[in-house]
Image: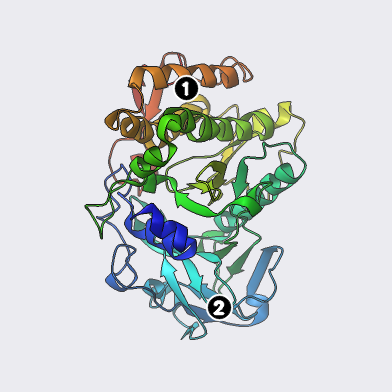
């Protein structure tokens, strides 16, 4: 895709970038386990219709603040069409929704409404493997993102977090509790996600680009230069400085601000980070989406005098007496942030002869050191880091942490 196309139609371009300028996850499972052909993110199908479970109003719960004037009936839970014949819905009334269509997004199970009156996103329950994990959205998972979204929103508005951070707010979740419900994990959820970023600089954002689109190849126009290469050309002599000061360091800062100031550990990956640009292609915001997987570090939050009580508990709770406590810190930063986010940007810069790998790593290690000095001395394991193998993670036993030496950005 050409940057001139993004300038002329930012809305359509974001849909296109998210779907087609997308190399998939480094795990290698994006193309292996995906949704049906009709709903496939990478397909040429522009849109499809959702289905809905219809039941009595008291079979549903709302968590958060229900958004008004949206295409959602009080007696419905929106579901992915791949799920309409699931055994767990036997006896339930399931209908096709004809009032709007949706476009798939990079996560497959999250969709964007295509309507004159609403273009918000909906995260849907998907009782099957997408990528390398199951994507059920039962109640604790559904409310987790809404709960974290509210915390981060408050922190943005009261200036606890820097003004270059924005989020796609998740105002509410809706839960369907089947009449035959025996376990909380049998519930079905959906999460509403606003399409307009929330942050101090959000009104100045002209174009949004998913982070992975910066280095990915356009699946439908493979001869186009990578978006990152086009940005470097626009930036000219400032390309190296802009990459460092407007993208790389703000990503590091965004991650550690959540950790150091809120005790929240966000499993950053290239799918859940987007870049907000102004009309002159200056980066003005790092945009975070999908907060369900944010881990609540009770040890850090307690030391900060923040609440350690969460409605989504025990989902994504990190406790100091957990045997994986330091491993999770390393996995999330050294593996997810460094391997999935920082490394591809460094490789792009080196390949385009914008900067040397050694120089970029030195600068980023210095910035990382600044943040680590504000954390407990035993927060990270010394001299080693942890990752997952490129295997399916469908069972808890599969989630083995592989020990590696020499972390990229820390000692």
- Between 318 and 362, the one nearer to me in the picture: 362
Q: Nearer the viewer, residue 258 or 164?
A: 164
Q: Residues within 10 Å of mark 2 (few under 14, many from 20)?
A: few
Q: Position of residue 31 (x, y in %)?
A: 26, 55
Q: Position of residue 166 (x, y in %)?
A: 61, 47
Which corner quadrant holds the C terminus?
A: top left
Q: Find the distance from the CA under tag 2 to the CA under tag 1.
A: 43 Å
- The residue located at (36%, 46%) in the rendering is 227
Figure check: 105 above or below 245:
below
Give the residue drawn at x 36%, y 61%. 128
Residue 329 in the image: above or below residue 372: below
Residue 107 visible, this orientation: no
Position of residue 196 in the picture relative to residue 27 (left or right): right
Q: Secondary structure at mark 2?
A: loop
Q: Residue at x 60, y 67 (%)?
A: 175
Q: Earlier in the sequence, mark 2 or mark 1?
A: 2
Q: Is residue 98 above or below residue 215?
A: below
Residue placed under numbered mark 2 in the picture:
116
Residue matched to label 1: 364
- Say left or right for 261 vs 337: right
50 left or right of 38 in image: right
Q: Measuring 52% from the left and 59% from the top, which residue is drawn there? A: 185
């Amino acid at each position: 895709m050409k940057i001139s196309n993004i300038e002329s139609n930012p809305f359509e371009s974001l849909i296109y970038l998210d779907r087609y300028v997308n190399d998939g996850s480094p795990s290698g499972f994006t193309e292996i386990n995906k949704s049906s052909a009709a709903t496939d993110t990478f397909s040429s199908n522009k849109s499809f219709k959702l289905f809905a479970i219809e039941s009595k109003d008291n079979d549903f719960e709302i968590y958060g603040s229900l958004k008004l004037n949206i295409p959602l009936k009080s007696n419905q839970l929106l579901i992915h069409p791949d799920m309409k014949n699931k055994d767990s819905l036997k006896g339930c009334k399931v209908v096709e929704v004809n009032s709007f269509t949706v476009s798939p997004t990079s996560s497959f199970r999250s969709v964007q409404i295509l309507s004159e009156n609403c273009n918000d996103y909906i995260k849907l329950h998907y009782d099957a493997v997408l990528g390398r994990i199951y994507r059920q959205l039962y109640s604790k998972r559904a409310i987790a993102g809404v709960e974290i979204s509210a915390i981060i929103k408050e922190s943005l508005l009261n200036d606890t977090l820097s003004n270059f951070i924005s989020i796609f707010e998740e105002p509410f979740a809706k839960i369907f509790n089947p009449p035959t419900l025996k376990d909380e994990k049998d519930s079905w959820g959906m999460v509403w996600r606003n399409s307009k970023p929330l942050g101090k600089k959000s009104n100045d954002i002209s174009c949004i680009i998913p982070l992975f689109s910066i280095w990915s190849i356009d699946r439908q126009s493979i001869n186009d230069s990578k978006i990152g290469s086009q940005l470097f050309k626009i930036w000219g002599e400032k390309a190296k400085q802009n990459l460092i000061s407007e993208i790389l360091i703000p990503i590091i800062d965004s991650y550690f601000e959540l950790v150091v100031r809120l005790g929240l550990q966000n499993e950053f990956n290239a799918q859940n980070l987007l870049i907000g640009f102004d009309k002159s292609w200056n980066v003005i915001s790092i945009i975070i989406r999908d907060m369900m997987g944010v881990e609540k570090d009770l040890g850090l939050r307690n030391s900060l005098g923040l609440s350690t009580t969460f409605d989504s508990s025990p989902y994504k709770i990190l406790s100091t007496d957990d045997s994986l406590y330091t491993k999770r810190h390393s996995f999330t930063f050294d593996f997810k942030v460094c391997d999935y986010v920082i490394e591809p940007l460094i490789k792009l810069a080196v390949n385009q002869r914008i900067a040397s790998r050694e120089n970029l790593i030195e600068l980023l290690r210095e910035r990382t050191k600044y943040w680590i000095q504000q954390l407990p001395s035993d927060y990270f394991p010394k001299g080693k880091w942890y990752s997952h193998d490129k295997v399916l993670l469908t069972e808890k036993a599969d989630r083995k942490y592989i020990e590696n030496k020499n972390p990229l950005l820390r000692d």
